[in-house]
Amino acid sequence: MIAAVRDAHKRLGRVQALRGVSLEVHEGELLALLGPNGAGKTTLVSLLVGLRAPDRGEVRLDGRDPREPAARRVLGMTPQGTGFPPALKVREVVELVRAHYPDPLPTAEVLARFGLEGLAGRSVQALSGGQARRLAVALAFAGNPRLAVLDEPTTGLDVESRRSLWREIQRFKQGGGTVLLTTHYLEEAESLATRVVVLDRGRVVAEGAPEAIKRRVGLKRVCLRAAELPEWPEVERREFEDGRYTLWTADADALVRRLVQSGVAFSDLEVLPVSLEEAFLAVLDEEEER
Ligand SMILES: Nc1ncnc2c1ncn2[C@@H]1O[C@H](COP(=O)(O)OP(=O)(O)OP(=O)(O)O)[C@@H](O)[C@H]1O
């Protein structure tokens, strides 16, 4: 285990941002922290990286208090916000971060991997939003750390930049690195994460592999083309768009049998799992009802 939080509580001003959160980050995993705005993700990350201390509970990074500089040597992170030292060029910012680590990646490699070669001599103030974001993520990897902590790494990036960043994140993980990331893109968590933790109002409300969280919701999607379908008891929810029905059901087998027995003409039948996004919304709905 490379990092752990046990029963952490944190109050920020009048807000109880964390209410007893426990979390372990295991070596080699890619853990995605999900949750709606204000759930406490950034606060939790700030405890793990030693920027804040919990009011109650314990935080460990590589077995030590993350507020000790020596503990943070295992850690690479995206800077909070995009506040780079203003007078520096891109290459200089990369070199500044590398200088803090015993075995960093070569500067040229950092620049190349994150599509920054053409920008090496550019002042950080003259970067576009997307370029600054790529630099921020590159800095998390520049020191060749054991744990990379990425707070919303791909927010504001175009599709191509997002995909190329995903490739770099995966490459780091394949090389044995551990990643903790927060994201609002469920698709990102679904394609990258080995494990997902969902926070809501300062608590962990769901945890597991993306597949397990989807199973917990217990529904499947049955999709088909048909002119009109009767109401069936197995169907929890239905949508009709462009001649195609999507039916959400807890028992896809029973629904398909019903469909065939009904004699309704249909085509293009597919049975699909729910997406992580649908599962995420269902988990938050359950919490809301509690
Ligand atoms: N410095 C602060 N002072 C007072 N309240 C704060 C402070 N920082 C955060 N909060 C509050 O603490 C709660 C948790 O915030 P946090 O930034 O951890 O959430 P988040 O899950 O990262 O949200 P988002 O998805 O919007 O980034 C929110 O209600 C937020 O308004």
Image (cartoon, rainbow, N blue to C red):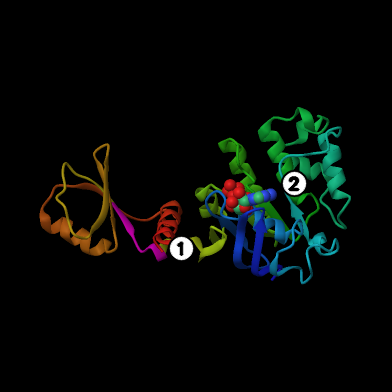
Left of 198 or right of it: where is 271? left
Left of 57 or right of it: where is 243? left
Magenta part of the protein: which range? Answer: 216-222
Left of 133 or right of it: where is 232? left
Q: Are marks 1 and 2 in contact (CB under 8 Å)?
A: no
Marks 1 and 2: which is nearer the front? 2
Is residue 221 one of those drawn in magenta? Answer: yes
Characterize the local packing of mark 1: few (<14), some (14-19) or many (20 or more) Cα atoms within 10 angstroms: many
Mark 1: amino acid: Ile
Report the front residue among 128 and 18: 18
Residue 229 percent across, percent down from the top left? 16, 48
| Residue at the disc numbered 1 | 213
Residue 109 percent across, percent down from the top left? 78, 44
Give whichever of discs 1 and 2 has the lower sequence position. 2
Residue 35 percent across, percent down from the top left? 53, 54
Residue 277 percent across, percent down from the top left? 45, 51
Answer with the quarter of the image where residue 10 lies: bottom right
Residue drawn at 84 percent across, 47 percent down: 97
Does the residue tagged 1 have its C-beta within 8 Å of any atom of ligand 1? no
Mark 2: amino acid: Pro
Number of residue marks = 2
140 up-or-down from 242: above or below: below
| Residue at the disc numbered 2 | 79
